[in-house]
Amino acid sequence: MNKREYDIAVIGAGPAGLTAALYAGRSMKRTLLLEAGIPGGELLNTENIEDYPGFASITGPDLASKMTEHSLSFGAELVSARVTAIDLEADGTKRIELEEGEPYFAKAVILTAGGQPRKLHVPGEQEYAGRGVSYCAVCDGAFFRGEHLAVVGGGDAAIEEAAFLTRYASKVTVIHRRQEFRAQPLLVERARQNPKMEFLLDMVVEEVKGDGERVESLRLRHLTSDRTSEFPVGGVFVFIGFLPNTGLLRMHADHDEQGYYLTDANMQTSVPGIFAAGDVRAQLTRQVTTAVGDATTAAMAATKLVESVPEPVA
Ligand code: NAP
């Protein structure tokens, strides 16, 4: 094996990627972990985590650094590089193209590049992210006990997460840009029956405002009258879709309508030797726990596959 050839290459060092690298390294496979930014993925955007077993409360960045240290302790090599494409050589070897520098080669690839919640792109959203602006009700809802919260969006995620937030909030106002909902009618009907939920329709958020520390209000535009108004809230949860980072494969891999990869029970995509785990994979829920569990399966399956292909790559 030359220095750019690996058994297993893991693309993206969020919780799924770090776990995949841990298990692949621990299985004594020559493992490459490629990450364009700082390892940790969405953990780095999460203030506090209270639903990862073993840690009653830990900050996202702390968990990210513990996972990174643990992951690399089994021999995986972390390389800071942006992957631009993954292609297949004639013998099935995966060729990993980078933004800068020569490509890497691997017998198996585990895609753990995650994705991002779609953003509103309004003033104040970025400034107050993690300080009243959130994209994860399960992660952050408990920090808003007794508060009046806003949820932006009209799809299944917005309605379901708004209902979840009523466990903690005194009131949850769903702000949606039209009268009709993309969400299933049953979910909307249930929400309408929920005494803690209310709806503001034909409205968009134009600005998230605060005191420099925490969110205090939203500036809303009423699309029917074109008036604006100030809406006091303790926090705002944005659920207007999610954008998986699934644009790297040069070949077709089966995916669902939103672009998430479909896998078999071993986390293998429809392309032999290419596995997916975490937020790039079609699944019921996007949690740190599910990401690490699925990544474990992907790494073990990739290891078996590599061991069944003993000949050298490229
Ligand atoms: P989604 O179905 O794409 O809905 C996104 C919502 O956000 C839409 O109502 C959209 O408004 C609104 N929106 C988009 N951009 C906006 C913007 N810039 N400003 C304000 N509003 C904006 O996304 P999702 O709710 O995340 O669901 C994604 C997929 O996961 C769906 O297929 C959904 O069924 C599935 N899912 C299912 C469940 C479940 O079955 N229990 C739960 C969660 C998610 P418009 O309607 O006007 O476009």
Image (cartoon, rainbow, N blue to C red):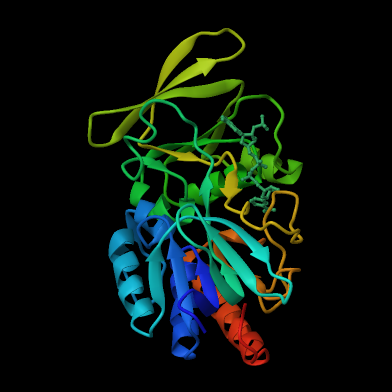
Q: Of residues 277 and 3, which is closer to you in this image?
A: 3
Q: Residue at x 55, y 33 (%)?
A: 198
Q: Of residues 159 and 122, which is closer to you in this image?
A: 122
Q: Residue 267, can we see it?
A: yes
Q: Is residue 312 left or right of residue 166?
A: right
Q: Position of residue 153 (x, y in %)?
A: 58, 35
Q: Position of residue 226 (x, y in %)?
A: 55, 8
Q: Residue at x 69, y 74 (%)?
A: 268
Q: Position of residue 13 (x, y in %)?
A: 44, 65
Q: Of residues 56 and 16, which is closer to you in this image?
A: 16
Compared with 76, 113 (above or below) is above
Compared with 141, 57 (above or below) is below
Task: Find ligand 1 in the image and state its quadrant.
Answer: top right
Q: Position of residue 248 (x, y in %)?
A: 61, 55
Q: Residue 57, can we see it?
A: no
Q: Is residue 261 left or right of residue 210?
A: right
Q: Is residue 95 left or right of residue 206?
A: right
Q: Residue at x 74, y 61 (%)?
A: 253
Furthest-left residue in view?
212
Q: Of residues 163 and 195, which is closer to you in this image?
A: 163
> Image quadrant for the C terminus?
bottom right
Q: Residue at x 46, y 74 (%)?
A: 32
